[in-house]
Structures are given as structure tokens and as C-alpha cells.
Image (cartoon, helix red, strand yellow):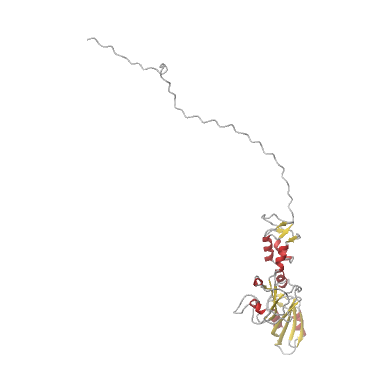
Amino acid sequence: MAERPKLTIKSRSPERDPHRKPVRALTAPRPAPSPPRLREAPLPQRPLAFVPSSPSIATPGAPATEGVRVSKLVTERGLASRREADEWIEAGYVRVGGRAVVLGQRVAPDALIDIDARARATQARLVTVLLHKPVGFVSGQPEDGHEPAVLLIKPAHRWPGDNSRIDYHPSHLRHLAPAGRLDIDSTGLLVFTQDGRIAKLLVGDQTRAEKEYLVRVRPTRPGPLPEESMALLRHGMELDGVALRPARVSWQNEEQLRIVLREGRKRQIRRMCERVGLEVLGLKRVRIGSVALGPLPAGQWRYLRDDERF
């Protein structure tokens, strides 16, 4: 039997196979080309304007290192109390250089300060009360079980002879504070006020308002009071290491002195009299500045009139 011929299968080369599509190599996709960058034109350079700073007013909100606080200037010039000045500034009632100032702002010491008329109107409604304080009441806060004298300022204790033409209102008791003091064993004129200007005028070491007292005394040493002691009462005495201002001291009668002071240290008159051998039996304040106690009865009060000035 004859052998059958072997069949040989030859692979076809791709490039030789006209019917086969060539295979492409796998490669990463190319990124899309970025758009061309635009060059920004430079901004025109503007010249810096120089704004000179004003010596009279600081920029609100900026830290101020020079000058005087506006609230302090308002107080020092007697326009308002420190509390009032702060309230006016917060309300926008205070201007310097035509601009409203802010709390804490500093200005030149000679700056021109303009106060809004609304602030003046508010200030005009503040009241001042004159009370004839009786013995047994304290001037300020309650102490040792004793009541404060401000409790007497109520319609039931208003003096019928008050001709101030002011109608009582409970708001008059708000922020009403004593401008000065009288100790519990003393009687006489005691001032309560809502007006910080009056308080500053009557209280403190710088006050110039005279205060007149009638003082009933009894000698603790035999014989009449020497003239040297009277001279010491008038000038040359010290209390707590502080030299006292000159005082006017004279006899009203054999048992009563008239003393006029321009200061008011704690229990000053009693301590002065004790130094020269006099015991104070009674003390009554009858005048502050040009405002006199007059016929106002003990325990009663009246408003300060518009025509009265301390």
C-alpha cells in the first residue's frame, strides 16, 4: 500500500496576510493638550495718596497712644459726669472735628468738643434734692442697722413750702446719690443729686464750695478756750498726716461755734474740737456754697430751684 504524502501547514505572516488586520500595541492615551496660557496685563500703578493725620482726633478703632480721652476732657471741663460722658459718647452725642467719637478715643487737650442738644436736654431733666437730715440716719449705704437718709425722699416727706415747680416722679430716685456726707450724730443740709457736675463740685479734695456749721460745744478743760487754740482751729492743724485747709471759726455765743470749711474729712469738726479740749454736743450744717438750709424742717426735703447755684 503506497504511503500517503504528509501535509505541512505553514503559518502565514501577518504582514503577508492580505486579509488580516494588523494588531496595534496597547499604549496609554495621550493627555489632551492644555489651552494656551493667557498673559495677564499688569495693573496700572496708582500713586499713593498721603492723608495727613489730624492732631485733634484719632481714627475710631485704631489704638491711640497720644492725647487725652474725650470722656475725661468732657468731665474736666464740667460738661458732664464721667458716667454721663460715656453714655453721651455711646449715643453719638459727642463730636470732635465734626465727627462722632467712640469710647476710649483720645484727642488733643485743647480739642473743640461739640455736645448734641439732645444730651443737654437729658441733663436738664436731672434733679437735685435738699434734705434736712435728722440725727440717726446715715448719708450713704445702711450700716450698723441704721437707715440711709435717701429713704426719706418720698412724697410724704416733701416740704409743703417747696416752690420749685417740679412734679415728683419715681424716676427722680434713679441714680440719686449723696453729694457729701453727714455723720450719723449730725443734722442739717444734705444734698442728693442725679447731676454729676454738682457731685463733682461738692465732693473731693478739689472742691471750693464752702460748708457752714453751727457747733454746740462743752470744754473738757477748766477755764475759757485759749486764743492759741482758736488760732489752731483756724489754721495749722493736721488730721491723719494731712494738713487741713484754713477755716473760719468764731463764737456765736458761749456754747456755740460757727465753723466754715472748704473740705470735709471724716468727722473733721469733732476731731478738730477734741484736739483743743472741746467736746461736740451737737453739729448742724446750715449752708453749702450759696444754698442755705433755711426753714426746711428736719426730716423733710425739697428740690433745688433753677435760680439756686452752689
Q: Residue 188, relative to residue 56: is it above or below?
A: below
* Residue 68: image location, x then y, percent: 71, 60
Visible residue check, residue 131:
no
Left or right, residue 290 beside residue 103? right
The N terminus, quarter of image: top left
Most distant residue in the bottom direction: 222
Q: Say which quarter of the image contains residue 87.
A: bottom right
* Residue 124: image location, x then y, percent: 72, 68
* Residue 163: image location, x then y, percent: 73, 77
Q: Say which quarter of the image contains residue 91.
A: bottom right
Q: Nearer the viewer, residue 267 or 47?
A: 47
The residue at 66%/77% (across/down) is 155
Q: Tell how many labels.
A: 0
Q: Nearer the viewer, residue 137 or 207?
A: 137
Most distant residue in the top direction: 2
Visible residue check, residue 256:
yes
Q: Nearer the viewer, residue 171 or 68?
A: 171
Q: Residue 45, relative to residue 137: is it above or below?
A: above
The C terminus, quarter of image: bottom right
Q: Residue 105, relative to residue 10: is it above or below?
A: below
Most distant residue in the left direction: 1
* Residue 48: image location, x then y, percent: 71, 44
